[in-house]
Amino acid sequence: MAGFLLRRLGGGLLLVVVVSSCAYLLAASALDPRGNYEGRQPPLPEHVVDTLLERYNLSDRVPLAERYVTWAGNVLTGDLGRTWDGRPIGEEVERRAGVTLRLVVPGVLVGGVTGVLVGAWAGARRYGAVDRLSTVGAFLVISTPAIVIAVCLQNTALWVNDVAGTDLLRATGEYTHALPGDAWDAAVDRARHLVLPTLTIALPLAAVYSRYQRALMADQVGADHVRTARAKGLTRRSALLRHGLRPTLGSAFAYFGYSSAALFTGAVFTEKVFGWHGLGEFLLDSVAKGDVNAVAAVCALAAATLVAVGILADVARFLLDPRAREV
């Protein structure tokens, strides 16, 4: 186990370095932070713009290799740099990461658990009503872009509120500002704001995981160890739960680890549609403003998070599936 973790940590660290470096080099080559200072009235003198860009390591008149070395050296000391207008990126990323975490975690839990349960049920009862309905629903959701799902849920919530005559669901924002009431009222308000973004993230996850889990569970129905368990007196349900479901969970965890990149993409659009000021919105705004350091910081954090999730998924598979320990 120790050797396994060391190999995964070493490979993950190398991957984070490569991805972060590529993100910075690509952003520094393609984006134009100088454009933020153009068109101002009165216009800023060119030497002032050059001074500001050099101060924040954004000047296109400094060689790219020199800018990269400066950026990498700062990152190694924990300094993620500053935005084009001088704000510390570390503080901004820390604040927005909490927002994204509060958005993603409920969506992952709801989508993952629902997908595994529906997929296991459908796989154990192939070609039944649940299997057919889940198949149609999953392919419908998978074929729909996340931003379309978000807008449809938003419009549905507005219709529900109109029919009910009150705001049952909140379609924008993380919470209501200056809300009167106690802590319970604040918690209820946050829950109302969280329902739609959670569904936006959970529905695609549940659709994908249900298809994957369905295939895994279908293979276990006729497996030798399941038939042996039934021959020893266990019911079909008990045999599948005890000896069929557990090995599939390890593979499901591994699949989750390697598919979590799509989750980050969905979170970007979800934050933008529902007005959550998280890392996804910060990334889109930074690209629009040519903010090289901010784009590189978000990409580096995303890479580190994906690697960490992948390692945790592999550990879960290692513990749940004895076959993984033989690899």
Image (spheres, helix red, strand yellow):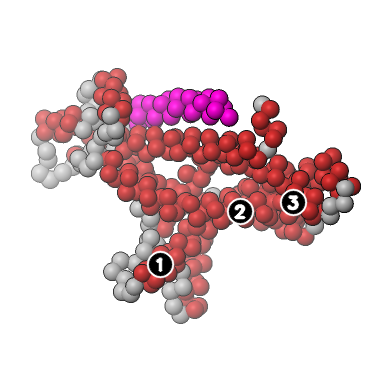
What residue would you read off at disc 2? 113
Q: Position of residue 60 (x, y in %)?
A: 24, 26
Which structural element holds mark 3?
helix
What residue would you read off at disc 1? 187
Considering depth in this image, is 28 or 222 the residue closer to the camera?
A: 222
The amino acid at mark 1 is Ala
Mark earlier in primary sequence (1, 2) = 2
What residue would you read off at disc 3? 241
Residue 19 in view (yes/no)? no
**Most extreme residue toward the bottom, as rendered?**
165
Q: Residues within 10 Å of mark 2 (few under 14, many from 20)?
A: some
**Numbered range of the magenta stretch:** 1-27
- Mark 2 vs mark 3: give the one in front: 3
Tell whether position 121 is magenta. Answer: no
At x 87%, y 51%, the residue is 233
Where is residue 70, by image quadrant? top left
| Label 2, label 3: how far apart the Cα atoms are | 15 Å
